[in-house]
Amino acid sequence: MCSQFQSETDTEIFAHLIQNALDKATVNSECDFIAVVQEALLPIEGNYALGILNVQYPDQLLFIRQGSPLIIGLGDDACFAASDIPAILSYTRRMLVLEDGDIAQLTRKGVLVYNSNGDEVQRPISTISWDPIRAEKGGYPHFMLKEIHEQPRAISDTLAGRLSSEQGRVYFETAFVPDDIILNIDRVLIIACGTSFHAGLTSCYDYERILGIPTSAEFASEFRYRNPILNDKTLVIAISQSGETADTLAAVDLAKQKGATVLSVCNMIESTIVRASDYVIYTHAGPEISVASTKAFVTQLVSLQLILLYIGKNRGILRKKELQTLTQDLLHLPTVASNLLSSEQQIQHIARRYAYAQNMLYLGRDIHYPLAMEGALKLKEISYIHAEAYPAGEMKHGPIALIDKDVPVFFIIHASSVREKVIANMEEIKARDGKIIALTLPQDEEVKRVADHVIEVPSISPHVDSILLSIPLQLFAYYVAVHRGTDVDQPRNLAKSVTVE
Ligand code: M6R
């Protein structure tokens, strides 16, 4: 007999299904209860992660996952369950990641895990090296500001032990894509969402320019809904801070079905995307709590540079001298990034001035265009100001109609072969009374002449400058949001991990 129930909440369906199954079954033991739960959930399609408590068995909690993340923390005298590591990091660093279909039984005695066949299984226990203090605000008013300031250290951690500047070599602690695949690939395809997509798009410029390999970046949420053409000569790089983004995960699965090799760039150990990929490079950003991604973004850019160097060396594209120079450039980053953070007050001042703008444009050309996209995303997600990014050369094809004295325009005009052309674009804005904030090289008198405000960012080398340029963009968005009084760390309508389509 099929019972009927009414509910306006999809999660309640689980409780009803389990109760129906219990009513019909003979449950004599805890094991029977686990089997009934597994059986009851069989008809469910889609992703879920559940915690289940039954009044008849008050001494145990069951946790089961399918598609959605679920980790179990193992403390000295307590166990924990959460959807991500930072949530329980202050209680324990020993974590166990459940596989799809697993059910974990938490009791006073500890944790037992059963697979979807009901067999008891052992899942590997990882010890997370993150310091729990790093998941707290540490005196900063917001996690976002703390995480912006942590970037020099996050960059150092991502580089640590991976570079030899004398040898011009890159080492990874996890198994990397083998040489026969590296030599065979004829294309790199980067898939990701949001900020991670911007890191991928930024790197495309260097992959094509330095490696000479056709490289493109795609929104994972679009990629999965067309019929992309890839094969065993395609290296797919999937970028994700959380490792749980549903669209990126689905894109990884699709790429693998089509025969591509999938390398993920991820911040979360043993996350679902990592486990679905063939290889992984971890960004060592540490826990990123603020919804707005900052240190994850810069460490993604750093990791993509490391991959570039590795491929460049192993395909024989980069010679030792070039590798040494590129390696040195990366190693300079933490110090220059630290110095850059000292321009915070000036950025705060400019942000206050434009905090009540209704619309803003972010413009750049070449590698600075994806950075403009990232600057606009940061601003809109935390300040709720409508911000759009355009390639500066596209202005005259429509968006220039928007310009007047009330639309501030943020230009990224740094070391690049198209600098002169961007100055011409700035003049076009100026002629229409637009207000200009320019992120530019120190002492660029020409830019200073046209712009209303200038934020100076030194150059190490064009292939690593994007990492530096992102810091003032983050600070600007942060201070605008603070002036507007929004909930900076937890902006409305957004979640840190987007585990649904
Ligand atoms: O965890 P992921 O890197 O896969 O997340 C992708 C996006 O949801 C994420 O980057 C989002 O755009 C950020 N909140 C932006 O700051």
Image (tube, rainbow, N blue to C red):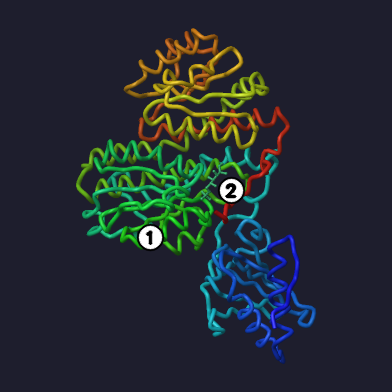
Answer above or below: position of 303 versus 108: above
Which amino acid, by three-letter code, is at mark 2?
Glu
Residue 36 at x, y = what percent?
65, 83
Disc 1 and disc 2: Cα gap in Å? 22 Å
Instruction: Residue type at mark 1: give it.
Output: Tyr
Quarter the C terminus occupies: bottom right
The first of marks 1 and 2 along the sequence is: 1
Horizontal side, residue 170 vs residue 130: left or right: left
Q: Position of residue 468 (x, y in %)?
A: 46, 32
Determine which of the numbered discs, if any, sits on residue 279 in the image.
1
| Tag shown at residue 288 | 2
Viewer-closest of 197 and 89: 197
Measured as percent of width and height from the top left, residue 242 is found at 54, 53
> Disc 2, ligand 1: is the CB inside 8 Å?
no
Is residue 228 shown left or right of residue 336?
left
Residue at disc 2, secondary structure: loop
Query: At 55% from the left edge and 40% from the top edge, which residue is drawn?
Result: 294
> For this rendering, which residue is in front, 414 or 244?
244
Give me the disc on residue 370.
none
Q: Where on the picture, by quarter, is residue 43?
A: bottom right
Helix, strand or loop status at disc 1: strand
In the image, is residue 159 above or below residue 369? below
Which of the 4 image quadrants contains residue 364?
A: top left
Residue visible at 43% across and 10% down?
445
Callout 1: few (<14), some (14-19), or many (20+) C-alpha neighbours within 10 Å? some
> Which residue is pictured at 40% across the width and 39% down the height?
201
The number of numbered badges drawn on the structure is 2
Instruction: Name which quarter of the figure residue 79 lies in.
Output: bottom right
Q: Is residue 73 above or below residue 325?
A: below
